[in-house]
Image (tube, grey):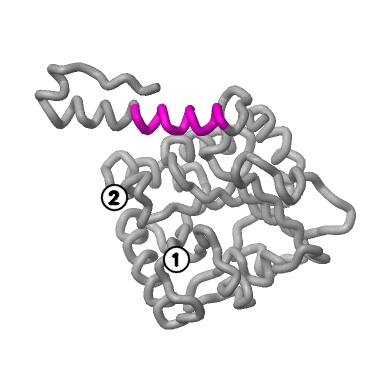
Protein backbone atom coordinates (compact mmCIF):
# COMPACT_ATOMS: atom_id res chain seq x y z
CA UNK A 1 0.00 0.00 0.00
CA UNK A 2 2.77 2.46 -0.94
CA UNK A 3 4.71 2.55 2.32
CA UNK A 4 8.46 3.05 2.68
CA UNK A 5 8.81 -0.58 3.69
CA UNK A 6 7.02 -1.78 0.56
CA UNK A 7 9.12 0.53 -1.59
CA UNK A 8 12.34 -1.05 -0.36
CA UNK A 9 10.93 -4.55 -0.76
CA UNK A 10 10.19 -3.75 -4.41
CA UNK A 11 13.48 -2.03 -5.27
CA UNK A 12 16.11 -3.98 -3.33
CA UNK A 13 15.95 -7.06 -5.65
CA UNK A 14 17.01 -4.76 -8.52
CA UNK A 15 19.83 -3.12 -6.57
CA UNK A 16 22.69 -5.02 -8.18
CA UNK A 17 21.74 -3.82 -11.68
CA UNK A 18 20.92 -0.17 -10.98
CA UNK A 19 22.60 2.49 -13.11
CA UNK A 20 22.01 5.89 -14.65
CA UNK A 21 20.83 6.60 -18.19
CA UNK A 22 24.24 7.32 -19.69
CA UNK A 23 25.71 4.08 -18.37
CA UNK A 24 22.59 2.12 -19.37
CA UNK A 25 22.89 3.40 -22.94
CA UNK A 26 25.83 1.05 -23.53
CA UNK A 27 24.74 -1.83 -21.31
CA UNK A 28 23.10 -5.12 -22.26
CA UNK A 29 21.53 -5.41 -18.81
CA UNK A 30 20.30 -2.55 -16.64
CA UNK A 31 17.74 -1.26 -14.18
CA UNK A 32 17.00 2.46 -14.10
CA UNK A 33 15.26 3.84 -11.02
CA UNK A 34 13.60 7.12 -11.92
CA UNK A 35 11.54 9.60 -9.89
CA UNK A 36 9.36 12.33 -11.41
CA UNK A 37 8.87 14.93 -8.67
CA UNK A 38 5.40 16.35 -9.24
CA UNK A 39 4.33 18.00 -5.99
CA UNK A 40 6.69 17.63 -3.04
CA UNK A 41 10.45 18.29 -3.01
CA UNK A 42 10.70 17.48 0.71
CA UNK A 43 9.31 14.02 0.10
CA UNK A 44 11.81 13.61 -2.76
CA UNK A 45 14.66 14.27 -0.32
CA UNK A 46 13.20 11.85 2.22
CA UNK A 47 13.02 9.13 -0.42
CA UNK A 48 16.56 9.93 -1.60
CA UNK A 49 17.78 9.49 1.99
CA UNK A 50 15.87 6.21 2.33
CA UNK A 51 17.45 4.91 -0.87
CA UNK A 52 20.91 6.00 0.23
CA UNK A 53 20.52 4.00 3.45
CA UNK A 54 20.24 0.76 1.45
CA UNK A 55 22.60 1.55 -1.43
CA UNK A 56 20.04 2.51 -4.10
CA UNK A 57 20.89 5.28 -6.58
CA UNK A 58 18.19 6.93 -8.67
CA UNK A 59 17.60 9.80 -11.06
CA UNK A 60 15.36 12.56 -9.70
CA UNK A 61 13.55 14.63 -12.31
CA UNK A 62 12.42 18.08 -11.20
CA UNK A 63 10.14 20.61 -12.90
CA UNK A 64 11.10 24.25 -13.27
CA UNK A 65 7.61 25.30 -14.46
CA UNK A 66 5.61 23.73 -11.66
CA UNK A 67 2.86 25.59 -9.81
CA UNK A 68 3.32 23.10 -6.95
CA UNK A 69 6.84 24.11 -5.90
CA UNK A 70 9.41 26.83 -6.52
CA UNK A 71 12.68 25.10 -7.30
CA UNK A 72 14.55 28.42 -7.05
CA UNK A 73 13.68 28.89 -3.37
CA UNK A 74 16.64 28.68 -0.99
CA UNK A 75 15.19 25.61 0.74
CA UNK A 76 14.65 23.77 -2.55
CA UNK A 77 18.13 24.62 -3.82
CA UNK A 78 19.45 23.03 -0.61
CA UNK A 79 17.30 19.97 -1.31
CA UNK A 80 18.75 19.65 -4.82
CA UNK A 81 22.26 19.84 -3.38
CA UNK A 82 21.49 17.25 -0.70
CA UNK A 83 20.02 14.80 -3.21
CA UNK A 84 23.12 15.11 -5.39
CA UNK A 85 25.38 14.67 -2.36
CA UNK A 86 23.71 11.31 -1.70
CA UNK A 87 24.93 10.07 -5.09
CA UNK A 88 21.70 10.49 -7.02
CA UNK A 89 21.46 12.21 -10.39
CA UNK A 90 19.24 15.24 -11.02
CA UNK A 91 17.41 15.54 -14.33
CA UNK A 92 14.80 17.82 -15.87
CA UNK A 93 11.12 16.91 -15.75
CA UNK A 94 10.13 18.81 -18.87
CA UNK A 95 6.79 20.61 -18.93
CA UNK A 96 5.55 20.44 -22.53
CA UNK A 97 1.76 20.86 -22.46
CA UNK A 98 1.99 24.30 -24.09
CA UNK A 99 4.09 23.10 -27.04
CA UNK A 100 2.33 22.76 -30.40
CA UNK A 101 2.06 19.22 -31.68
CA UNK A 102 5.00 18.16 -33.89
CA UNK A 103 6.69 21.55 -33.43
CA UNK A 104 10.23 20.22 -33.06
CA UNK A 105 11.88 23.65 -33.08
CA UNK A 106 9.72 24.92 -30.20
CA UNK A 107 10.24 21.68 -28.30
CA UNK A 108 14.04 21.88 -28.48
CA UNK A 109 13.97 25.59 -27.63
CA UNK A 110 11.84 24.90 -24.55
CA UNK A 111 14.04 21.96 -23.56
CA UNK A 112 17.11 24.20 -23.67
CA UNK A 113 15.37 26.98 -21.75
CA UNK A 114 14.14 24.77 -18.92
CA UNK A 115 17.48 22.92 -18.76
CA UNK A 116 19.31 26.23 -18.43
CA UNK A 117 17.06 27.26 -15.55
CA UNK A 118 17.67 24.00 -13.69
CA UNK A 119 21.43 24.14 -14.30
CA UNK A 120 21.52 27.63 -12.79
CA UNK A 121 20.24 26.13 -9.52
CA UNK A 122 22.69 23.24 -9.11
CA UNK A 123 26.42 22.67 -9.40
CA UNK A 124 26.34 19.99 -12.10
CA UNK A 125 25.35 19.70 -15.74
CA UNK A 126 21.90 18.33 -16.61
CA UNK A 127 22.20 15.47 -19.09
CA UNK A 128 18.82 13.74 -19.11
CA UNK A 129 15.16 14.70 -19.17
CA UNK A 130 11.80 13.02 -18.72
CA UNK A 131 8.47 14.35 -19.91
CA UNK A 132 5.67 15.63 -17.71
CA UNK A 133 2.47 14.11 -19.09
CA UNK A 134 4.11 12.88 -22.32
CA UNK A 135 2.09 13.33 -25.49
CA UNK A 136 1.73 10.49 -27.99
CA UNK A 137 3.21 12.59 -30.77
CA UNK A 138 6.45 12.92 -28.83
CA UNK A 139 6.60 9.25 -27.79
CA UNK A 140 6.47 8.43 -31.51
CA UNK A 141 9.82 10.22 -31.89
CA UNK A 142 12.18 7.33 -31.26
CA UNK A 143 15.43 9.10 -30.42
CA UNK A 144 17.74 8.60 -27.45
CA UNK A 145 19.06 12.13 -27.81
CA UNK A 146 17.02 15.27 -28.35
CA UNK A 147 19.52 18.02 -29.01
CA UNK A 148 22.30 17.19 -26.55
CA UNK A 149 19.99 15.70 -23.91
CA UNK A 150 19.28 12.05 -23.17
CA UNK A 151 15.58 11.27 -23.47
CA UNK A 152 14.18 8.97 -20.75
CA UNK A 153 11.61 7.78 -23.31
CA UNK A 154 14.26 7.07 -25.96
CA UNK A 155 14.30 3.62 -27.60
CA UNK A 156 17.23 2.42 -25.48
CA UNK A 157 15.20 2.95 -22.30
CA UNK A 158 11.54 2.62 -23.27
CA UNK A 159 9.55 0.62 -25.83
CA UNK A 160 6.52 2.49 -27.13
CA UNK A 161 4.28 -0.55 -27.40
CA UNK A 162 1.74 -2.43 -25.29
CA UNK A 163 3.82 -5.60 -25.67
CA UNK A 164 7.50 -4.80 -25.00
CA UNK A 165 10.04 -7.47 -25.87
CA UNK A 166 13.30 -5.99 -24.54
CA UNK A 167 12.63 -3.31 -21.91
CA UNK A 168 10.12 -3.66 -19.08
CA UNK A 169 8.61 -0.40 -17.85
CA UNK A 170 6.95 -0.05 -14.45
CA UNK A 171 5.16 3.07 -13.17
CA UNK A 172 3.20 3.92 -10.01
CA UNK A 173 1.17 6.76 -11.55
CA UNK A 174 -2.01 7.71 -9.68
CA UNK A 175 -1.19 5.29 -6.87
CA UNK A 176 -1.53 2.30 -9.18
CA UNK A 177 0.85 -0.12 -10.90
CA UNK A 178 -0.81 -0.14 -14.32
CA UNK A 179 2.08 -2.08 -15.88
CA UNK A 180 2.42 -4.51 -12.98
CA UNK A 181 4.44 -4.28 -9.78
CA UNK A 182 8.23 -4.17 -10.18
CA UNK A 183 9.77 -7.63 -10.20
CA UNK A 184 12.53 -9.42 -12.04
CA UNK A 185 11.18 -11.28 -15.05
CA UNK A 186 12.97 -14.02 -17.00
CA UNK A 187 12.00 -12.41 -20.32
CA UNK A 188 13.67 -9.05 -19.66
CA UNK A 189 17.21 -7.86 -18.98
CA UNK A 190 16.39 -4.15 -19.13
CA UNK A 191 14.04 -2.27 -16.82
CA UNK A 192 12.95 1.31 -16.21
CA UNK A 193 11.09 1.85 -12.94
CA UNK A 194 9.23 5.14 -12.54
CA UNK A 195 8.05 6.09 -9.08
CA UNK A 196 6.76 9.39 -7.75
CA UNK A 197 8.01 10.44 -4.29
CA UNK A 198 4.59 11.98 -3.62
CA UNK A 199 3.06 8.48 -3.65
CA UNK A 200 5.21 7.04 -0.84
CA UNK A 201 5.06 7.71 2.89
CA UNK A 202 6.22 6.05 6.10
CA UNK A 203 2.86 4.36 6.65
CA UNK A 204 0.75 2.61 3.96
CA UNK A 205 -2.07 4.67 2.51
CA UNK A 206 -4.71 4.56 -0.20
CA UNK A 207 -5.21 7.16 -2.96
CA UNK A 208 -7.49 9.45 -0.94
CA UNK A 209 -5.21 9.32 2.11
CA UNK A 210 -2.24 10.05 -0.12
CA UNK A 211 -3.86 13.16 -1.58
CA UNK A 212 -4.70 14.33 1.92
CA UNK A 213 -1.12 13.85 3.13
CA UNK A 214 0.28 15.71 0.13
CA UNK A 215 -2.19 18.58 0.57
CA UNK A 216 -1.57 18.84 4.30
CA UNK A 217 2.22 18.95 3.87
CA UNK A 218 1.93 21.84 1.40
CA UNK A 219 -0.59 23.66 3.57
CA UNK A 220 1.62 23.43 6.66
CA UNK A 221 4.67 24.69 4.76
CA UNK A 222 2.68 27.60 3.30
CA UNK A 223 1.40 28.44 6.78
CA UNK A 224 4.98 28.52 8.01
CA UNK A 225 5.95 30.84 5.17
CA UNK A 226 3.08 33.22 5.90
CA UNK A 227 3.99 33.27 9.59
CA UNK A 228 7.63 34.08 8.87
CA UNK A 229 6.92 36.68 6.18
CA UNK A 230 3.75 38.40 7.41
CA UNK A 231 3.48 39.86 10.89
CA UNK A 232 -0.32 40.28 10.74
CA UNK A 233 -0.88 36.64 9.76
CA UNK A 234 1.35 35.58 12.62
CA UNK A 235 -0.81 37.59 15.04
CA UNK A 236 -4.02 36.00 13.74
CA UNK A 237 -2.72 32.45 14.12
CA UNK A 238 -2.61 29.35 11.94
CA UNK A 239 -5.11 28.39 9.27
CA UNK A 240 -6.40 24.90 9.97
CA UNK A 241 -4.96 22.46 7.39
CA UNK A 242 -7.61 19.75 7.03
Q: Position of residue 134 (x, y in %)?
A: 55, 63
Q: Position of residue 136 (x, y in %)?
A: 60, 69
Q: Position of residue 125 (x, y in %)?
A: 41, 63
Q: Residue furthest left?
A: 232
Secondary structure of the residue carrying numbered label 2 = loop
Task: Locate residue 224 relative to residue 29 in the image: left or right.
Answer: left
Kindly identify which numbered label has been placed on residue 72.
2
Q: In the figure, 65 relative to 221: above or below?
A: below
Residue 214 colored magenta?
yes
Foreground tag (2 vs 1): 1
Q: Which quarter of the picture shows residue 219?
A: top left
Total marks placed: 2
Looking at the image, which is closer to me, 103 or 126? 103
Residue at 45% across, 47% down: 84
Quadrant the N terminus occupies = top right
Q: Position of residue 217 (x, y in %)?
A: 40, 29
Looking at the image, which is closer to me, 163 or 126? 163
What are the residue bounds of the magenta stretch?
A: 208-219
Task: Locate residue 139 relative to residue 77 in the image: left or right.
Answer: right
Quadrant the C terminus occupies = top left
Instruction: Identify the residue position indicated by label 1 in the image.
Output: 96
Q: Which quarter of the picture shows residue 169?
A: bottom right
Looking at the image, which is closer to me, 211 or 155? 211
Secondary structure of the residue carrying numbered label 1 = loop
Residue at 70% across, 40% down: 11
Amino acid sequence: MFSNEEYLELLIPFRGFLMGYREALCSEKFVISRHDVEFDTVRALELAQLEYSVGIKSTYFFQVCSDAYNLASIDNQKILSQIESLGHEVGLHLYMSHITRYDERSFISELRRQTSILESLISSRIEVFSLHRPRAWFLEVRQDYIGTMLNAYGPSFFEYTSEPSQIKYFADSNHSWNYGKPRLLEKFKKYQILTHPDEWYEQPNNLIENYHLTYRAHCERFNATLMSENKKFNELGLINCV
